Image (tube, coloured by chain):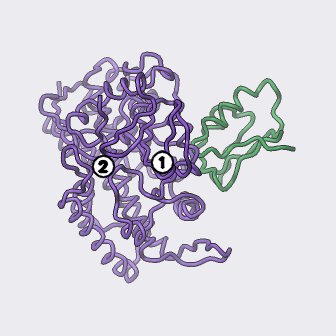
Protein backbone atom coordinates (compact mmCIF):
# COMPACT_ATOMS: atom_id res chain seq x y z
CA UNK A 1 0.00 0.00 0.00
CA UNK A 2 1.32 3.40 -1.00
CA UNK A 3 0.39 6.81 0.43
CA UNK A 4 0.56 9.44 -2.28
CA UNK A 5 -1.29 12.61 -1.20
CA UNK A 6 -1.40 13.73 -4.84
CA UNK A 7 -3.15 10.62 -6.17
CA UNK A 8 -6.60 11.42 -7.55
CA UNK A 9 -7.72 7.88 -6.75
CA UNK A 10 -6.61 8.40 -3.13
CA UNK A 11 -8.70 11.61 -2.97
CA UNK A 12 -11.83 9.59 -3.78
CA UNK A 13 -11.46 7.57 -0.57
CA UNK A 14 -8.32 7.99 1.54
CA UNK A 15 -9.68 6.09 4.53
CA UNK A 16 -8.76 2.47 3.58
CA UNK A 17 -5.17 3.62 3.03
CA UNK A 18 -5.11 5.31 6.42
CA UNK A 19 -6.52 2.22 8.12
CA UNK A 20 -3.76 0.10 6.58
CA UNK A 21 -1.11 2.59 7.67
CA UNK A 22 -2.35 2.69 11.28
CA UNK A 23 -2.36 -1.07 11.42
CA UNK A 24 0.79 -1.98 9.51
CA UNK A 25 2.99 1.12 9.24
CA UNK A 26 2.22 3.58 12.06
CA UNK A 27 5.49 5.20 11.02
CA UNK A 28 5.32 5.15 7.24
CA UNK A 29 8.12 5.96 4.83
CA UNK A 30 7.64 6.95 1.19
CA UNK A 31 11.14 6.81 -0.29
CA UNK A 32 10.14 8.02 -3.72
CA UNK A 33 8.44 11.21 -2.55
CA UNK A 34 10.90 11.40 0.35
CA UNK A 35 8.60 11.78 3.35
CA UNK A 36 7.56 10.00 6.53
CA UNK A 37 4.05 9.91 8.01
CA UNK A 38 2.37 9.35 11.37
CA UNK A 39 -1.21 8.10 11.29
CA UNK A 40 -2.33 7.15 14.81
CA UNK A 41 -4.26 9.64 16.93
CA UNK A 42 -1.83 9.60 19.87
CA UNK A 43 1.17 10.14 17.64
CA UNK A 44 -0.35 12.91 15.53
CA UNK A 45 -1.56 14.60 18.70
CA UNK A 46 1.84 14.41 20.42
CA UNK A 47 3.75 15.63 17.37
CA UNK A 48 1.28 18.50 16.81
CA UNK A 49 2.09 19.85 20.27
CA UNK A 50 5.87 19.55 19.91
CA UNK A 51 6.73 22.53 17.68
CA UNK A 52 10.36 22.50 18.83
CA UNK A 53 10.86 19.10 17.19
CA UNK A 54 8.32 19.38 14.37
CA UNK A 55 8.93 22.71 12.64
CA UNK A 56 6.53 24.50 10.28
CA UNK A 57 9.21 26.81 8.87
CA UNK A 58 9.62 24.90 5.61
CA UNK A 59 5.91 24.82 4.93
CA UNK A 60 3.01 22.63 6.00
CA UNK A 61 2.28 20.92 2.68
CA UNK A 62 4.40 18.21 1.13
CA UNK A 63 5.28 20.11 -2.03
CA UNK A 64 8.23 22.46 -1.70
CA UNK A 65 7.24 26.10 -1.65
CA UNK A 66 9.60 28.70 -3.07
CA UNK A 67 11.64 29.97 -0.07
CA UNK A 68 11.75 33.46 -1.60
CA UNK A 69 7.98 33.55 -1.46
CA UNK A 70 7.97 32.44 2.20
CA UNK A 71 10.53 35.19 2.91
CA UNK A 72 8.80 38.05 1.13
CA UNK A 73 5.32 37.42 2.53
CA UNK A 74 5.88 35.59 5.82
CA UNK A 75 2.83 33.71 7.12
CA UNK A 76 2.44 32.51 10.67
CA UNK A 77 1.32 29.06 9.49
CA UNK A 78 4.86 28.66 8.06
CA UNK A 79 6.67 30.03 11.13
CA UNK A 80 7.64 28.68 14.54
CA UNK A 81 7.51 30.55 17.85
CA UNK A 82 8.51 33.19 18.81
CA UNK A 83 7.92 34.94 15.49
CA UNK A 84 4.73 32.96 14.91
CA UNK A 85 3.34 34.10 18.25
CA UNK A 86 4.12 37.77 17.62
CA UNK A 87 2.25 37.74 14.32
CA UNK A 88 -0.63 35.67 15.64
CA UNK A 89 -1.24 38.04 18.56
CA UNK A 90 -1.92 40.87 16.11
CA UNK A 91 -4.98 39.14 14.69
CA UNK A 92 -6.10 36.63 17.32
CA UNK A 93 -8.40 39.11 19.09
CA UNK A 94 -10.48 39.42 15.92
CA UNK A 95 -11.28 35.68 15.96
CA UNK A 96 -12.15 34.92 19.58
CA UNK A 97 -15.48 33.14 20.12
CA UNK A 98 -17.03 36.29 21.58
CA UNK A 99 -15.97 38.54 18.69
CA UNK A 100 -17.06 35.93 16.20
CA UNK A 101 -20.47 35.52 17.89
CA UNK A 102 -21.17 39.17 17.09
CA UNK A 103 -20.95 38.30 13.38
CA UNK A 104 -23.90 35.89 13.56
CA UNK A 105 -26.56 38.29 12.17
CA UNK A 106 -24.33 39.15 9.21
CA UNK A 107 -23.51 35.49 8.54
CA UNK A 108 -27.20 34.58 8.74
CA UNK A 109 -28.29 37.36 6.39
CA UNK A 110 -25.63 36.29 3.88
CA UNK A 111 -26.68 32.63 4.13
CA UNK A 112 -30.34 33.53 3.62
CA UNK A 113 -29.53 35.74 0.63
CA UNK A 114 -27.61 32.88 -1.02
CA UNK A 115 -30.22 30.21 -0.16
CA UNK A 116 -33.33 32.04 -1.39
CA UNK A 117 -32.68 31.44 -5.13
CA UNK A 118 -31.85 27.78 -4.39
CA UNK A 119 -35.07 27.39 -2.41
CA UNK A 120 -37.04 28.84 -5.34
CA UNK A 121 -35.26 26.57 -7.84
CA UNK A 122 -35.68 23.50 -5.61
CA UNK A 123 -31.95 22.76 -5.56
CA UNK A 124 -28.63 23.60 -7.18
CA UNK A 125 -24.94 22.99 -6.60
CA UNK A 126 -24.34 23.10 -2.87
CA UNK A 127 -20.65 23.95 -3.35
CA UNK A 128 -20.80 26.48 -6.16
CA UNK A 129 -23.99 28.22 -5.04
CA UNK A 130 -23.68 28.09 -1.27
CA UNK A 131 -20.68 26.61 0.54
CA UNK A 132 -18.23 28.58 -1.62
CA UNK A 133 -19.77 32.08 -1.65
CA UNK A 134 -20.79 32.10 2.04
CA UNK A 135 -17.31 31.79 3.62
CA UNK A 136 -15.95 33.99 0.84
CA UNK A 137 -18.28 36.87 1.71
CA UNK A 138 -17.61 36.45 5.42
CA UNK A 139 -13.80 36.39 5.35
CA UNK A 140 -13.42 39.09 2.70
CA UNK A 141 -15.84 41.35 4.58
CA UNK A 142 -13.77 40.81 7.73
CA UNK A 143 -10.59 41.62 5.84
CA UNK A 144 -12.11 44.59 4.00
CA UNK A 145 -11.64 43.31 0.43
CA UNK A 146 -13.76 45.25 -2.10
CA UNK A 147 -16.90 43.41 -3.26
CA UNK A 148 -16.02 43.52 -6.93
CA UNK A 149 -12.73 41.64 -6.47
CA UNK A 150 -13.89 38.76 -4.30
CA UNK A 151 -14.90 36.14 -6.85
CA UNK A 152 -11.70 36.53 -8.87
CA UNK A 153 -9.55 36.43 -5.76
CA UNK A 154 -11.18 33.25 -4.52
CA UNK A 155 -10.82 31.58 -7.91
CA UNK A 156 -7.10 32.30 -7.80
CA UNK A 157 -6.97 30.65 -4.37
CA UNK A 158 -8.61 27.50 -5.77
CA UNK A 159 -6.24 27.44 -8.75
CA UNK A 160 -3.19 28.03 -6.55
CA UNK A 161 -4.05 24.91 -4.55
CA UNK A 162 -4.97 22.72 -7.54
CA UNK A 163 -2.53 19.85 -8.21
CA UNK A 164 -1.82 17.46 -11.08
CA UNK A 165 -2.24 13.70 -10.51
CA UNK A 166 0.46 11.91 -8.49
CA UNK A 167 3.10 14.65 -8.47
CA UNK A 168 4.13 17.28 -5.94
CA UNK A 169 5.37 19.54 -8.77
CA UNK A 170 3.38 22.78 -8.81
CA UNK A 171 1.36 23.07 -12.05
CA UNK A 172 2.01 26.21 -14.13
CA UNK A 173 -1.61 27.30 -13.55
CA UNK A 174 -1.10 27.19 -9.78
CA UNK A 175 2.06 29.30 -9.96
CA UNK A 176 0.35 31.79 -12.28
CA UNK A 177 -2.61 32.09 -9.90
CA UNK A 178 -0.29 32.69 -6.92
CA UNK A 179 1.53 35.43 -8.82
CA UNK A 180 -1.70 37.13 -9.86
CA UNK A 181 -2.97 36.99 -6.30
CA UNK A 182 0.24 38.51 -4.95
CA UNK A 183 0.12 41.27 -7.53
CA UNK A 184 -3.46 41.96 -6.53
CA UNK A 185 -2.57 42.33 -2.84
CA UNK A 186 0.42 44.56 -3.62
CA UNK A 187 -1.89 46.84 -5.63
CA UNK A 188 -4.68 46.78 -3.03
CA UNK A 189 -2.58 48.00 -0.08
CA UNK A 190 -1.85 51.53 -1.37
CA UNK A 191 -5.49 51.78 -2.44
CA UNK A 192 -6.63 50.88 1.09
CA UNK A 193 -4.13 53.31 2.64
CA UNK A 194 -5.70 56.10 0.57
CA UNK A 195 -9.28 54.99 1.25
CA UNK A 196 -9.27 53.03 4.51
CA UNK A 197 -12.24 50.90 5.61
CA UNK A 198 -12.96 49.18 8.93
CA UNK A 199 -11.56 45.81 7.84
CA UNK A 200 -8.74 43.84 9.38
CA UNK A 201 -6.20 44.76 6.67
CA UNK A 202 -6.50 48.45 7.51
CA UNK A 203 -6.23 47.66 11.22
CA UNK A 204 -2.88 46.02 10.45
CA UNK A 205 -1.52 49.27 8.95
CA UNK A 206 -1.35 50.69 12.48
CA UNK A 207 -0.47 47.48 14.30
CA UNK A 208 2.87 47.29 16.08
CA UNK A 209 4.85 44.11 16.40
CA UNK A 210 7.58 43.24 18.90
CA UNK A 211 11.13 43.08 17.60
CA UNK A 212 13.89 40.74 18.77
CA UNK A 213 15.49 43.52 20.86
CA UNK A 214 12.24 44.14 22.76
CA UNK A 215 11.17 47.25 20.84
CA UNK A 216 8.23 47.54 18.46
CA UNK A 217 7.88 48.25 14.78
CA UNK A 218 5.18 48.55 12.13
CA UNK A 219 4.46 45.59 9.87
CA UNK A 220 6.06 45.54 6.44
CA UNK A 221 3.78 45.37 3.40
CA UNK A 222 5.05 41.82 2.89
CA UNK A 223 3.93 40.84 6.39
CA UNK A 224 0.49 42.40 5.84
CA UNK A 225 0.18 40.57 2.53
CA UNK A 226 1.17 37.36 4.29
CA UNK A 227 -1.90 37.83 6.51
CA UNK A 228 -4.17 38.73 3.55
CA UNK A 229 -3.06 35.71 1.63
CA UNK A 230 -3.23 33.28 4.55
CA UNK A 231 -6.51 34.44 6.09
CA UNK A 232 -8.10 34.81 2.64
CA UNK A 233 -7.20 31.26 1.68
CA UNK A 234 -7.83 29.63 5.06
CA UNK A 235 -11.14 31.46 5.52
CA UNK A 236 -12.37 30.21 2.16
CA UNK A 237 -11.12 26.73 1.47
CA UNK A 238 -11.68 24.65 4.56
CA UNK A 239 -15.08 26.00 5.65
CA UNK A 240 -16.34 25.39 2.11
CA UNK A 241 -15.24 21.77 2.44
CA UNK A 242 -16.71 21.33 5.93
CA UNK A 243 -20.12 22.62 4.85
CA UNK A 244 -20.24 20.43 1.74
CA UNK A 245 -19.17 17.36 3.73
CA UNK A 246 -22.06 18.06 6.11
CA UNK A 247 -24.48 18.33 3.18
CA UNK A 248 -23.35 15.02 1.66
CA UNK A 249 -23.36 13.19 5.00
CA UNK A 250 -26.84 14.46 5.90
CA UNK A 251 -28.10 13.33 2.50
CA UNK A 252 -26.66 9.86 3.18
CA UNK A 253 -28.25 9.91 6.63
CA UNK A 254 -31.75 11.41 6.21
CA UNK A 255 -32.63 10.47 9.81
CA UNK A 256 -29.77 12.60 11.06
CA UNK A 257 -30.86 15.49 8.87
CA UNK A 258 -34.44 15.20 10.13
CA UNK A 259 -33.20 15.14 13.72
CA UNK A 260 -31.05 18.25 13.17
CA UNK A 261 -33.95 20.11 11.54
CA UNK A 262 -36.16 19.26 14.52
CA UNK A 263 -33.46 19.93 17.13
CA UNK A 264 -30.98 22.49 15.74
CA UNK A 265 -29.45 22.66 19.22
CA UNK A 266 -27.66 19.42 18.30
CA UNK A 267 -25.86 21.04 15.36
CA UNK A 268 -22.67 21.95 17.27
CA UNK A 269 -22.10 18.28 18.19
CA UNK A 270 -22.97 17.22 14.65
CA UNK A 271 -20.40 19.66 13.24
CA UNK A 272 -17.71 18.16 15.50
CA UNK A 273 -18.61 14.74 14.13
CA UNK A 274 -18.42 15.97 10.52
CA UNK A 275 -14.96 17.37 11.31
CA UNK A 276 -13.93 14.06 12.81
CA UNK A 277 -15.43 11.98 10.04
CA UNK A 278 -13.90 13.91 7.14
CA UNK A 279 -11.35 16.46 8.18
CA UNK A 280 -11.05 19.17 5.50
CA UNK A 281 -7.34 19.48 6.32
CA UNK A 282 -6.01 15.95 5.82
CA UNK A 283 -2.48 16.48 7.06
CA UNK A 284 0.03 19.01 8.30
CA UNK A 285 3.61 18.59 7.09
CA UNK A 286 6.50 19.34 9.42
CA UNK A 287 10.30 19.27 9.24
CA UNK A 288 12.02 17.21 11.93
CA UNK A 289 14.55 19.34 13.82
CA UNK A 290 16.43 16.45 15.49
CA UNK A 291 16.65 12.70 15.04
CA UNK A 292 13.47 11.18 16.46
CA UNK A 293 12.59 7.58 17.20
CA UNK A 294 9.19 6.09 16.26
CA UNK A 295 8.38 2.38 16.40
CA UNK A 296 12.05 1.39 16.47
CA UNK A 297 13.04 3.49 13.49
CA UNK A 298 14.90 6.79 13.38
CA UNK A 299 13.51 9.71 11.44
CA UNK A 300 16.60 11.80 10.72
CA UNK A 301 16.96 15.51 11.38
CA UNK A 302 15.83 17.51 8.35
CA UNK A 303 13.32 14.89 7.17
CA UNK A 304 9.79 15.84 6.16
CA UNK A 305 6.98 14.15 8.08
CA UNK A 306 3.22 14.26 7.53
CA UNK A 307 0.93 14.36 10.57
CA UNK A 308 -2.10 12.61 9.09
CA UNK A 309 -5.05 14.31 10.76
CA UNK A 310 -7.52 12.63 8.41
CA UNK A 311 -6.29 9.28 9.69
CA UNK A 312 -6.00 10.27 13.36
CA UNK A 313 -9.67 11.24 13.53
CA UNK A 314 -10.60 7.74 12.28
CA UNK A 315 -8.26 5.90 14.64
CA UNK A 316 -10.07 2.89 16.15
CA UNK A 317 -7.74 3.21 19.18
CA UNK A 318 -9.39 6.56 20.01
CA UNK A 319 -12.90 6.31 18.52
CA UNK A 320 -15.05 3.18 18.75
CA UNK A 321 -16.43 2.14 15.36
CA UNK A 322 -14.63 5.10 13.74
CA UNK A 323 -16.06 4.68 10.23
CA UNK A 324 -19.61 5.16 11.47
CA UNK A 325 -20.96 8.72 11.21
CA UNK A 326 -22.73 9.27 14.52
CA UNK A 327 -23.62 12.73 15.81
CA UNK A 328 -24.41 11.35 19.27
CA UNK A 329 -20.75 10.57 20.02
CA UNK A 330 -19.39 12.26 23.12
CA UNK A 331 -17.54 15.42 22.02
CA UNK A 332 -14.13 14.19 20.87
CA UNK A 333 -10.75 15.74 21.50
CA UNK A 334 -10.75 17.48 18.16
CA UNK A 335 -7.69 17.21 15.94
CA UNK A 336 -9.27 18.37 12.68
CA UNK A 337 -8.52 21.97 13.62
CA UNK A 338 -5.00 21.18 14.83
CA UNK A 339 -3.79 21.48 18.39
CA UNK A 340 -1.32 23.77 20.16
CA UNK A 341 0.46 26.83 18.76
CA UNK A 342 -0.99 26.41 15.25
CA UNK A 343 -4.55 25.58 16.37
CA UNK A 344 -6.91 26.91 13.69
CA UNK A 345 -7.28 30.63 14.32
CA UNK A 346 -10.63 30.61 12.54
CA UNK A 347 -12.09 27.63 14.43
CA UNK A 348 -14.89 29.64 16.07
CA UNK A 349 -15.71 31.38 12.81
CA UNK A 350 -15.84 28.09 10.89
CA UNK A 351 -18.10 26.54 13.52
CA UNK A 352 -20.39 29.57 13.55
CA UNK A 353 -20.64 29.77 9.76
CA UNK A 354 -21.35 26.06 9.52
CA UNK A 355 -24.00 26.06 12.24
CA UNK A 356 -25.84 29.08 10.85
CA UNK A 357 -25.57 27.81 7.26
CA UNK A 358 -26.98 24.39 8.19
CA UNK A 359 -29.80 25.91 10.27
CA UNK A 360 -30.92 28.04 7.34
CA UNK A 361 -30.37 25.25 4.81
CA UNK A 362 -32.45 22.82 6.89
CA UNK A 363 -35.30 25.32 7.10
CA UNK A 364 -35.51 25.50 3.32
CA UNK A 365 -34.60 21.89 2.57
CA UNK A 366 -36.07 19.67 5.30
CA UNK A 367 -35.72 16.81 2.82
CA UNK A 368 -33.23 16.71 -0.04
CA UNK A 369 -31.02 14.32 -1.97
CA UNK A 370 -27.49 14.74 -3.26
CA UNK A 371 -26.79 13.15 -6.63
CA UNK A 372 -23.50 11.51 -5.71
CA UNK A 373 -23.01 10.16 -9.21
CA UNK A 374 -22.45 13.78 -10.31
CA UNK A 375 -20.37 14.90 -7.32
CA UNK A 376 -16.67 15.60 -7.90
CA UNK A 377 -13.67 15.98 -5.59
CA UNK A 378 -11.12 18.77 -5.47
CA UNK A 379 -7.51 17.74 -6.07
CA UNK A 380 -5.51 19.77 -3.64
CA UNK A 381 -2.50 18.80 -1.59
CA UNK A 382 -3.72 18.65 1.99
CA UNK A 383 -7.27 19.98 1.59
CA UNK A 384 -9.84 17.29 0.92
CA UNK A 385 -13.45 17.68 -0.09
CA UNK A 386 -16.04 18.32 -2.75
CA UNK A 387 -15.80 20.56 -5.81
CA UNK A 388 -19.39 19.88 -6.94
CA UNK A 389 -22.41 18.65 -4.97
CA UNK A 390 -25.67 18.75 -7.01
CA UNK A 391 -28.75 18.44 -4.83
CA UNK A 392 -32.52 18.66 -5.18
CA UNK A 393 -35.43 18.92 -2.81
CA UNK A 394 -37.01 15.55 -2.08
CA UNK B 1 1.38 22.48 42.26
CA UNK B 2 -0.43 25.60 41.17
CA UNK B 3 -2.81 25.79 38.19
CA UNK B 4 -2.25 28.61 35.68
CA UNK B 5 -3.61 29.82 32.33
CA UNK B 6 -0.87 31.36 30.19
CA UNK B 7 -2.31 34.69 28.97
CA UNK B 8 0.10 34.71 26.02
CA UNK B 9 -1.41 31.49 24.71
CA UNK B 10 -5.09 31.66 25.76
CA UNK B 11 -7.39 32.81 22.96
CA UNK B 12 -10.65 32.41 24.84
CA UNK B 13 -11.87 29.19 23.27
CA UNK B 14 -13.59 28.38 26.55
CA UNK B 15 -13.08 24.62 26.46
CA UNK B 16 -11.81 24.70 30.08
CA UNK B 17 -14.82 26.62 31.34
CA UNK B 18 -17.17 24.11 29.72
CA UNK B 19 -15.31 21.17 31.25
CA UNK B 20 -14.84 22.66 34.73
CA UNK B 21 -16.83 25.86 35.32
CA UNK B 22 -15.99 25.77 39.03
CA UNK B 23 -12.27 25.97 38.23
CA UNK B 24 -12.06 28.19 35.12
CA UNK B 25 -13.90 31.36 34.11
CA UNK B 26 -13.78 33.07 30.75
CA UNK B 27 -13.55 36.84 31.24
CA UNK B 28 -15.03 39.66 29.16
CA UNK B 29 -11.57 40.13 27.67
CA UNK B 30 -11.69 36.64 26.10
CA UNK B 31 -9.11 35.33 28.57
CA UNK B 32 -9.70 32.32 30.76
CA UNK B 33 -8.75 32.69 34.40
CA UNK B 34 -8.23 30.18 37.17
CA UNK B 35 -10.78 30.54 39.97
CA UNK B 36 -9.18 27.90 42.19
CA UNK B 37 -5.44 27.65 41.73
CA UNK B 38 -5.14 24.60 44.00
CA UNK B 39 -8.08 22.49 42.81
CA UNK B 40 -9.27 19.75 45.18
CA UNK B 41 -8.38 16.13 44.37
CA UNK B 42 -12.01 15.53 43.47
CA UNK B 43 -11.56 17.86 40.46
CA UNK B 44 -8.27 16.42 39.24
CA UNK B 45 -9.90 14.41 36.44
CA UNK B 46 -11.62 17.49 35.03
CA UNK B 47 -8.49 19.58 35.37
CA UNK B 48 -6.47 16.95 33.50
CA UNK B 49 -9.11 16.97 30.74
CA UNK B 50 -8.96 20.77 30.54
CA UNK B 51 -5.16 20.71 30.30
CA UNK B 52 -5.26 18.05 27.61
CA UNK B 53 -8.11 19.52 25.59
CA UNK B 54 -7.20 23.22 25.65
CA UNK B 55 -6.74 23.83 21.91
CA UNK B 56 -3.90 26.26 22.57
CA UNK B 57 -2.31 24.20 25.37
CA UNK B 58 -2.46 27.29 27.57
CA UNK B 59 -3.17 25.52 30.89
CA UNK B 60 -0.37 24.18 33.09
CA UNK B 61 0.42 22.99 36.59
CA UNK B 62 3.52 24.78 37.86
CA UNK B 63 5.52 24.31 41.09
CA UNK B 64 4.29 26.47 44.00
Q: Residue at x 49, y 71 (%)?
A: A204
Chain holding disc 2: A
Q: Residue at x 53, y 43 (%)?
A: A48
Indicate the secondary structure of the residue bearing disc 2: helix
Same chain, labels 1 and 2 = yes
> Residue A292 lies in what quarter of the image?
top right
Q: Which mark is residue A134?
A: 2
* Chain purple in the figure, letter: A
> Dot 1: few (<14), some (14–19), or many (≥20) neighbours within 10 Å?
some
Left or right of A286? Residue B23 is right
Q: Nearer the viewer, mark 1 or mark 2?
A: 1
Q: Residue A344: percent from the left, percent from the top?
A: 48, 48
Q: Is residue B64 above or below residue A122?
A: below
Q: Residue A121: percent from the left, percent from the top?
A: 13, 38
Count of marks placed on residues: 2
Q: Residue B55: percent from the left, percent from the top?
A: 57, 42
Q: Work out how far the residue at label 1 is from the one at label 2, CA to CA, in angstroms.
A: 19 Å
Q: Nearer the viewer, residue A331 or A10?
A: A10
Chain B visual colour: green
Indicate the secondary structure of the residue bearing disc 1: loop
Q: Which mark is residue A344?
A: 1
Amino acid sequence: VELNPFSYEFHEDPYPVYRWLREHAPLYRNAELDFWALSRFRDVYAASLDWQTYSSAEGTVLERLDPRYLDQTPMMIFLDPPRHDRLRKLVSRAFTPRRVAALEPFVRATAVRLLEPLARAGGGDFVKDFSTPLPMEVIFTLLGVPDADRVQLREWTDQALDRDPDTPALPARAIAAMMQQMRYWYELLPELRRHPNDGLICALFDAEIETDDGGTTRLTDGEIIGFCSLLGAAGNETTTKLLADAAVLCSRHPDTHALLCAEPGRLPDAIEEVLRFCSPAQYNARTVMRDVEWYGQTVPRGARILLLIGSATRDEREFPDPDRFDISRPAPTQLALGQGVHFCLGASLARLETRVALEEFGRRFPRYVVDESRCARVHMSNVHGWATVPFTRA
Amino acid sequence: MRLIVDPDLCEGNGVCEKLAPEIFRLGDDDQARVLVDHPPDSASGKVEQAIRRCPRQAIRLVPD
